[in-house]
Image: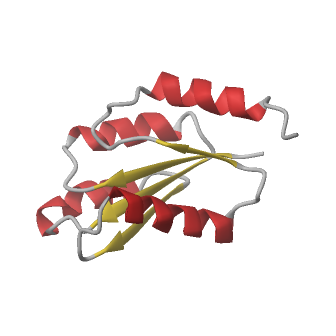
């Protein structure tokens, strides 16, 4: 059972690079969705894409957080197992890495009945 973190991002702060680097140390895979950020943010997404076990999905027009999450969920459905754990967070660091790890641990041991 893998732990996959999903982070939708629209025009993320530079601090997102460090946050993503911290997240990938705690999960098995990181999926970041560039929700139509303009080219000023290409460097941020490029640095994140270079992190191990990280996938960056992008499209050119901002479509909102819900669409970004659906995009990530579709990607995960195609590339990961049904029993894998999906955790969502925000690019602004609103959710601490420790909280995301706690949620993943709770889900890992939750009975699937």
Q: Give how far across and how far down residue 76 sits, in percent.
A: 61, 63
The residue under the point 60% across, 29% down is 103
Q: Is residue 69 left or right of residue 77?
A: left
Rendering colour mode: secondary structure
The residue under the point 19% across, 44% down is 13
Q: Give how far across and how far down residue 31 sits, in percent.
A: 49, 56
Q: Quadrant of the N terminus?
A: top right
Q: Is residue 68 left or right of residue 1?
A: left
Say if 82 sits above or below 74 in the image.
above
- Residue at the extreme front of the image, as rendered: 113
The residue under the point 47% across, 37% down is 23
Q: Give how far across and how far down residue 17 sits, in percent.
A: 30, 44
Q: Nearer the viewer, residue 18 or 65?
A: 65
Residue 42's image quarter?
Answer: bottom left
Residue 74's image quarter?
Answer: bottom right
- Residue at the extreme left of the image, as rendered: 40
Q: Nearer the viewer, residue 4 or 53?
A: 4
- Residue at the extreme right of the image, as rendered: 113
Q: Is residue 55 left or right of residue 77?
A: left
Q: Quadrant of the C terminus?
A: top right
Say if 113 sits above or below 38 in the image.
above
Q: Nearer the viewer, residue 22 or 109?
A: 109
Q: Give how far across and how far down residue 75 sits, in percent.
A: 57, 68
Q: Nearer the viewer, residue 69 or 31?
A: 69
């Amino acid at each position: 059972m893998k732990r996959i973190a999903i982070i939708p991002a629209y025009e993320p702060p530079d601090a997102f690079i460090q946050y993503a680097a911290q997240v990938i140390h705690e999960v098995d895979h990181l999926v970041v969705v560039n929700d139509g950020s303009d080219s000023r943010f290409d460097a941020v997404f490029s640095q994140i894409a270079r992190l191990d076990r990280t996938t960056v999905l992008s499209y050119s027009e901002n479509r909102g957080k819900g669409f970004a999450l659906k995009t990530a969920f579709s990607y995960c459905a195609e590339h990961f197992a049904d029993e894998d754990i999906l955790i969502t967070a925000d690019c602004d660091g609103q959710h601490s890495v420790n909280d995301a790890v706690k949620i993943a641990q709770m889900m890992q041991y939750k009975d699937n009945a």
